[in-house]
Image (cartoon, rainbow, N blue to C red):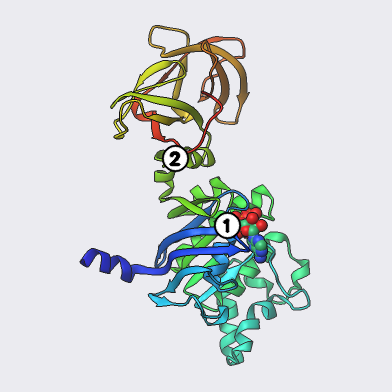
């Protein structure tokens, strides 16, 4: 139908039923992904989940064991890397140490035998884009980590790729520099209008940068969605646990809109699970109200720790039934205090059981 056709024509990268085996180990398992033109997509997951492998398959440094990869609708599964309209920026900047900034950026264009005047113009433009206008003659060794990474990005964008692949490009930078560079990357993405596919294990970075987040675990895609979707509506307890802080408890559906966990019965949103279905219950620490013990409390307990986190306080509360909850609030309740807890029905995320929790 028309909508599918429109969606297809809008798609720049297609990953269809892709698996990758090393020996008999499946590092990627039936991965399907469609990236729209101009989108900022982040592949997020813990170390070893297959993020880099997926990026390398798109770049062409490795070939898929099964499935196909398309760029602009064309099957490029067997196309060598230099014939793909993509460029990669790595965590280690991989600059040529014996060349200055200009020659590092010009390298690929010189190989293509482009006229020197055109190269000069393009290098200047790329340097302007990464905020390094006056650095042409500098040795790359004399630059800071952040500046070297900017040069690496300039070297990638000077080739005008349709897609820029970035593999943990900020991982080697300190926190302050990383935050600054995140903002710059986002601006750069908007100015360039090209598609970014970005790999990171840092959930905050993914939430800050992306139009779309692809959450991976053990070679499989767990969820694809906008940062708000992923944060507010995690599809399972893995995603909930990986993105932000979560309290994850074993629960049991008592009725369509009623779930039991932590020794009590709570009203929740009907997610279509039948009565008596075991479920994972996810509560965000900032969604739990904490106050003096009162009749309004659904749970009562004692604060076991209280830490100031800059804007809010993070408190651990042990309920009278022996369950532990992390709670965040702008007000502090010191360790040892008796408190009441309350969660609204729509903040009780009930999801399909994925694994056993130890908080039953
Ligand atoms: P990290 O964040 O640590 O880089 P990742 O999510 O990017 O992790 P990959 O680098 O894609 O993960 O690796 C996924 C799994 O595949 C790991 O268990 C890794 O050891 C394995 N692997 C990757 N490349 C090879 C290879 N060439 N031969 C054998 N195993 C490999």
In the rendered image, residue 356, in percent from the top left (x then y), is placed at: 52, 32
Quadrant assignment, res 219: bottom right
Regarding residue 154, the answer to whether it shows in the image is: yes
Determine which of the numbered discs, if any, sits on residue 241 in the image.
Answer: none
In the rendered image, residue 19, in percent from the top left (x then y), is placed at: 51, 63
Determine which of the numbered discs, if any, sits on residue 50 in the image.
Answer: 1
Nearer to us in this view, 273 or 88: 273
Nearer to us in this view, 213 or 46: 46
In the rendered image, residue 224, in percent from the top left (x then y), is placed at: 42, 52
Assign a secondary structure to mark 1.
loop
Nearer to us in this view, 280 or 40: 280
Give the residue drawn at x 58%, y 73%.
156
Question: Which residue is situated farthest in the left direction here?
Answer: 1
Residue 114 in the figure: left or right of residue 220: right
Give the residue drawn at x 50%, y 53%.
220
Give the residue drawn at x 26%, y 65%.
4
Q: Quadrant of ligand 1?
A: bottom right
Q: How packed is label 1: few (under 14 Cα within 10 Å), some, or many (20 or more)?
A: many
Regarding residue 170, the answer to whether it shows in the image is: no
Please state the total of marks drawn on the protein image: 2
Quadrant assignment, res 111: bottom right
Determine which of the numbered discs, if any, sits on residue 236 in the image.
Answer: 2
Residues marked 1 and 2 touching at CB (< 8 Å): no
Residue 242 in the figure: left or right of residue 297: right
In the rendered image, residue 262, in percent from the top left (x then y), is placed at: 47, 19
Assign a secondary structure to mark 2.
loop
Nearer to us in this view, 136 or 266: 266
- Asked if the residue at label 1 sits under 8 Å from ligand 1, the reply is yes
> Which image quadrant: the N terminus?
bottom left
């Amino acid at each position: 139908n028309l909508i599918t056709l429109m969606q297809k024509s809008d798609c720049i990268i297609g990953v269809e039923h892709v698996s990758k085996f090393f020996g008999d180990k499946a590092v990627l398992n039936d991965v399907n992904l469609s990236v729209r033109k101009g989108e900022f997509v982040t592949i997020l997951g813990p170390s070893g989940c297959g993020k880099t492998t997926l990026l390398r398959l798109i770049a062409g440094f490795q070939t898929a064991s099964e499935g196909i990869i398309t760029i602009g609708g064309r099957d490029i599964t067997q196309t060598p890397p230099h014939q793909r309209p993509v460029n990669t920026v790595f965590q280690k900047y991989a600059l040529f140490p014996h060349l200055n900034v200009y020659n590092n950026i010009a390298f690929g264009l010189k190989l293509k035998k482009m006229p020197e005047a055109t190269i000069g113009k393009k290098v200047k433009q790329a340097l302007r884009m990464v905020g390094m206008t006056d650095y042409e003659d500098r040795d790359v060794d004399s630059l800071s980590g952040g500046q070297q990474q900017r040069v690496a990005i300039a070297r990638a964008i000077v080739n005008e790729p349709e897609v820029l692949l970035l593999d943990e490009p900020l991982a080697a930078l300190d926190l302050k520099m990383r935050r600054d560079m995140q903002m710059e990357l986002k601006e750069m993405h908007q100015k360039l209008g090209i598609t970014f596919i970005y790999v990171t294990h840092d959930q905050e970075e993914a939430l800050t940068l992306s139009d779309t987040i692809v959450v991976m675990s053990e070679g499989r895609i767990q969820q694809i969605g906008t940062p708000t979707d992923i944060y507010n509506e995690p599809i399972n307890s893995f995603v909930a646990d990986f993105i932000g802080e979560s309290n994850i408890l074993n629960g049991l559906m008592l009725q369509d809109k009623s779930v039991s966990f932590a020794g009590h019965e709570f009203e929740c949103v009907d997610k279509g699970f039948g009565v008596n279905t075991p479920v994972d219950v996810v509560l965000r620490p900032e969604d739990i109200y904490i106050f003096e013990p009162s009749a309004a409390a659904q749970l009562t307990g004692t604060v076991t720790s209280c830490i100031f986190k800059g804007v809010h306080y993070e408190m651990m509360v042990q309920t009278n039934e022996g369950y532990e909850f992390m709670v965040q609030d702008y007000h502090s309740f010191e360790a040892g205090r008796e408190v009441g807890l309350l969660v609204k029905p729509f903040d009780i995320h009930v999801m399909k059981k994925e694994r056993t929790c130890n908080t039953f």
